[in-house]
Structure formats: structure tokens, C-alpha cells
Image (cartoon, grey):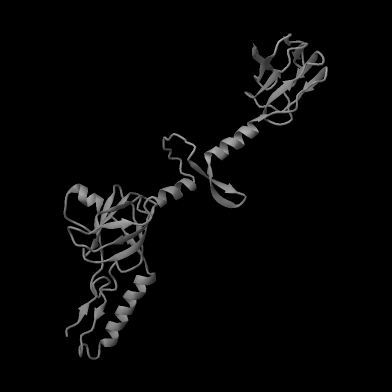
Amino acid sequence: MASSYTDNSGIELIGVGEQSGTWGTTTNNNLEIIDKALNGVTDITVSGDMNIAVDDGDKTSNGHTRVLKLTGSLSSSATLTITDASREAFYIVHNTTGQQVNIRQRTSGTTQELADASTNIPNLGKGFIYADGKGTSGASVVDLLDGATGNLDMLAGSTTATSTTIADADRLIVNDNGTMVQAAVTDLSTYVNANLVTVPSAITSASDTLTPSSAQSIYQKVDTSSNNVALTLAIGSLAIGQYIIVDKISSSNTLTLTYPSNSQGVSLGNSVSFAIAINQNGTVFTFVETIKY
């Protein structure tokens, strides 16, 4: 039996009774091919379209190694073709060429068929690809990381945005005290609503000063059922644009609102009503509206 080669890695199978005196050389060559296929890393300088070849018995072929680091300085995209088209192989690919690299094995078919049977790895992208070896008219190269790379890029700080409508069923990735979890946007809504506005106990004293102690807007009830109330509003720790809503919850007596630095303000008479005061510039409130109902 004459020597032959394995279908995928091109390892030489020595025929019975052949290669007397050179058997060891062939065996060592085969072992080097196996070693590269398991753990080899090859830098491939890409200057344009080229082949990733797995040549029978040739340990120097650039397609024998497991990791392909694509280097160079391309001015436009390039196509790398895994040959021959009957080889089954998988590679870890790191593209540093400066341009997108298209990797294929199929070489015949329509433009769309060739595109569908190929995989694209962007500059600085990584791929974990396999070639199925189904011939020049049927072979496909598939990136097992397709989709995952984009998600990892987003987590790493990609600024690419996609227009979307947020719905209750959507999820956000959150670091929950050291554990990464998917949180429902409804949970986020609950948290934001709970911390967006402070709701203190109702004020009943005849005079009081409301001074926000944190950067949260305030919804403040005032109960005037027992007496008239004079309430002074202070900016406190409010940020510009935050507000205080004062809700007079009784139709008895009156509520007078004033600023701490001057006598301006508003008086709410014998009706149930509320007023909105907005932090205008960090030092002054603006009363926007009073409503009676």
C-alpha cells in the first residue's frame, strides 16, 4: 500500500513496507503537524487576498496551526480562502490587519451564496471558526462567536446604539453586589420611582421650614385641619430642575408658602390645593402653578 494522507490535517500515513530508513523523519514531521494543530500560533502577514493552506505533509503550511494571528496594514478588506475545499478544520482567529477580513472555503456560486458561506472578522475582532470541507460549491465557514462578540463589545464599552422601544419584558444586565444578573426593567422602574421623590410625613405644625437633605425632589403633604400653617421652603440639597410639591390636604384654614431669603411666596386659602416649586438656578425657587380642586 502506497503512502497516503489524512483527509483534514494532511498527516502522512506510511504505506506498509515503505520508507525504509526514513520512517522516523516522516513520523517526526507528522508529530509536528499534530503539535501545531493542537497548540500552534502562526502570524500571517495579510497584504491582500490569499490562501490559508493545509498542504499534505507540509508542516510549514500556514493552515496547520490552531491560532491564526492576522497581521499587516491593509488599506481595504481582504478575502482568505481555506484550501483545499475538502478540509475540515477549526481556527481561533485574531485580526489586526487594520481592515475587515472575509474568510471562506467555498469558491463557486452566486455572490450571495459566497457571502452566506463565509464569515467576516472586523479589524481587532476575534473569531472561533470552523470550515466544514464540503467542497468548492458547498463548503461553509462559520464563526461560533457570531453575535457573542457584539454583546461582549457592548459590555466592554462600545458606543454603538440601537434604536429600540423599552418594554416591561425587557431585561438589563446589572452587577448585583458582585453577581451579574438580568434585571427586569420593571424592577428598575420601581427603584427609580422609589428614589426619585421623597415623601415625608404630613406637616401639621403652625410653622415649619422644609429643607431637603438629599438630592431628591419632595412630595410634601400639609394638614391644615387644626390650624393655619406657614411653611418656608429652602433649596437645601436639591439639584437644579428638582422640585417640591406641597399638597394642602385639608379644606380648613390656610397655608402660606414663603422662601427663606425674602417674603415672596404664595397663600393657599380655604380649599384643597397644591403648589409646585422648582429649583431654578440653585438659589431661587420658581412657583410654577397652584391648583385647587
| Residue depicted at 26% across the width and 68% down the height | 54
Is 252 situated above or below 99? above
Give the position of the C terminus as an image quadrant. top right
Q: Nearer the viewer, residue 192 or 1?
A: 192
Snapshot quadrant of residue 129 = bottom left
Q: Is residue 36 left or right of residue 154?
A: left
Whether residue 241 sits left or right of residue 1 in the image: it is: right
x, y percent for residue 33: 31, 74
Which residue is found at the position 30% from the left and 53% from the top? 119
Q: Is residue 79 at all visible to an observer of this figure?
A: yes
Q: Position of residue 224 (x, y in %)?
A: 78, 16
Occupied quadrant, residue 216: top right
Above or below, comparing residue 135 to residue 112 in the picture: below
Nearer the observer, 45 or 175: 175
Where is residue 9 shown, x and y percent of the image? 28, 72
- Residue 117, x across and y down, in percent: 25, 54
Res. 260 visible in picture: no
Identify the residue at image location x=26%, y=62%.
132
- Residue 201 versus residue 147 in the image, above or below: above
Q: Quadrant of residue 138?
A: bottom left
Say left or right for 37 vs 84: right
**Quadrant location of the N terminus in the rendered image:** bottom left
Instruction: Tell me how many marks there are.
Output: 0
